[in-house]
Image (cartoon, rainbow, N blue to C red):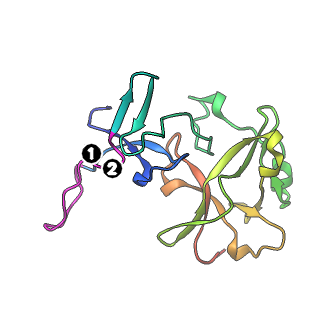
Amino acid sequence: LFGGEFALDVNLWKMVKGNKVNFVQVDKDAKFKWWEKKQQTLQYGGGRDWVLNIHDGTISPKNAPSLVLGRGVRTLALIDIDQTPQGVLHFDNLNLLGMGEPARLVDRNRGDVVGKMKQEETNFREWRYIESRIFQEKEDEAAIQVKYIDKNYLAVYEEGQEEEKALVLDVSFWEMIPYNTVNFVGGWVYEP
């Protein structure tokens, strides 16, 4: 794929319903210590092993045949406004955010609201995070409120929660590329 060898990979090799599936490739310039096993793109025995289910037209991870590839939930992502205008969200109430008021991120033209994939935080190294999710407006209870802080950060706003514990919208690994995910992330302490 795209001038190199990529493999379809179950995220972190966790065979659970709803987990993400991505194309991955080992960095050809990666440095390994002499005692470490060199990683390979086509690595057998985990999240890159697949079975074609010809009888029903599905594809399953070899290690979890009851799961199949399908359309997952929608998350917030960076969208190229010129290349993919149909994927752009146009939020209705940015004026409230601009005045420092908390507001829900709602696109009434599309019927979409921004929410959390789940309520519990997950940790990755020193970061706390919750993945974003796009819900239909009829699932109104799933919508979250955000607040625009210091004319820079969009923080999840929850009544009575201290700002130090707030999560902010964050582009995954600060990679400003189309379709990269945008989630709610916070360190151990909020520092203005």
Q: Is residue 190 above or below residue 155?
A: below
Decide if residue 11 is on the left or right side of residue 37: right
Q: In the rendered image, which residue does mark 2 sit on?
A: 46
Location of residue 60 by image quarter = top left
- Tag 1 near tag 2, CB within 8 Å: no
The residue nearer to you, when weighing 60 against 33, is 60
Q: Residue at x 13, y 66 (%)?
A: 34
Decide if residue 7 is on the left or right side of residue 88: left
Helix, strand or loop at disc 2?
loop
Q: In the rendered image, which residue does mark 1 sit on?
A: 41
Q: Residues within 10 Å of mark 1 (few under 14, many from 20)?
A: some
Question: Which secondary structure class fits the magenta region best?
Answer: loop
Q: Residue at x 21, y 60 (%)?
A: 31
Quadrant (top left, top right, bottom left, bottom right) of the N terminus: top left
What x and y, as percent, mark residue 119?
69, 61
Q: Which of labels 1 and 2 is toward the front?
A: 2
Decide if residue 87 is on the left or right side of residue 127: right
Q: Is residue 28 above or below residue 119?
A: above
Q: Residues within 10 Å of mark 2 (few under 14, many from 20)?
A: some
Location of residue 32 by image quarter = bottom left
Q: What amino acid is labelled 2 in the image?
A: Gly
Helix, strand or loop at disc 1?
loop
Q: Identify the magenta region.
A: 28-49
Closer to the chain start, of discs 1 and 2, is: 1
What x and y, as percent, mark residue 57?
45, 23
Q: Residue at x 65, y 52 (%)?
A: 117
Q: Is residue 114 part of the magenta span, yes or no?
A: no
Q: Is residue 33 part of the magenta span, yes or no?
A: yes
The residue nearer to you, when weighing 31 against 176, is 31
What x and y, as percent, mark residue 24?
35, 44
Q: How many marks?
A: 2
